[in-house]
Image (tube, rainbow, N blue to C red):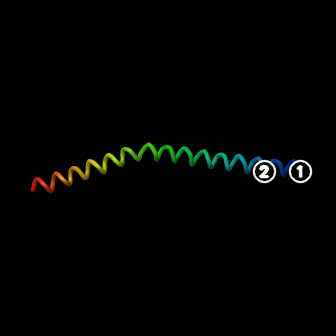
Amino acid sequence: MRYISDLERKVQTLQTERDTNGLSVENNELKLRVPSMEQQVHLQDGHDLFSKTSV
């Protein structure tokens, strides 16, 4: 019975590690996207400002 309990605990630990690793990967991907998105916002702001002053 203890063997089964140890295996269940190990499975739970491995599932938690898998979930944590998956979230870490997703977080890193999102962090990489942020600078590009910020740049797009700045470009759009500049375009909007230019459009308003050109009229």
Q: Nearer the viewer, residue 2 or 49?
A: 49
Q: How many marks?
A: 2
The amino acid type found where label 2 is placed reads Arg
- Type of amino acid under label 1: Arg
Which element carries disc 1, helix, strand or loop? helix
Which residue is at 62% across, 48% downward? 20
Q: Is residue 16 left or right of residue 8?
A: left
Q: Dividing the image into 4 quarters, which one contains the C terminus?
A: bottom left
* Neighbour tally class for label 1: few under 14, some 14-19, many 20 plus, Cα within 10 Å: few
Q: In which quarter of the view is residue 52 placed?
A: bottom left
Left or right? Give the position of 9 relative to 1: left
Question: Residue 38 location, x and y as percent?
Answer: 35, 48
Disc 1 from disc 2: Cα separation: 10 Å
Q: Which residue is mark 2?
A: 9
Q: Which residue is mark 1?
A: 2
> What residue lies at 57% left-to-right and 49% top-to-bottom?
23
Residue 4 screen position, x and y as percent: 85, 50
Residue at (72, 48) in percent of width and height: 13
N-term mark: 1 or 2: 1
**Mark sitting on residue 25:** none
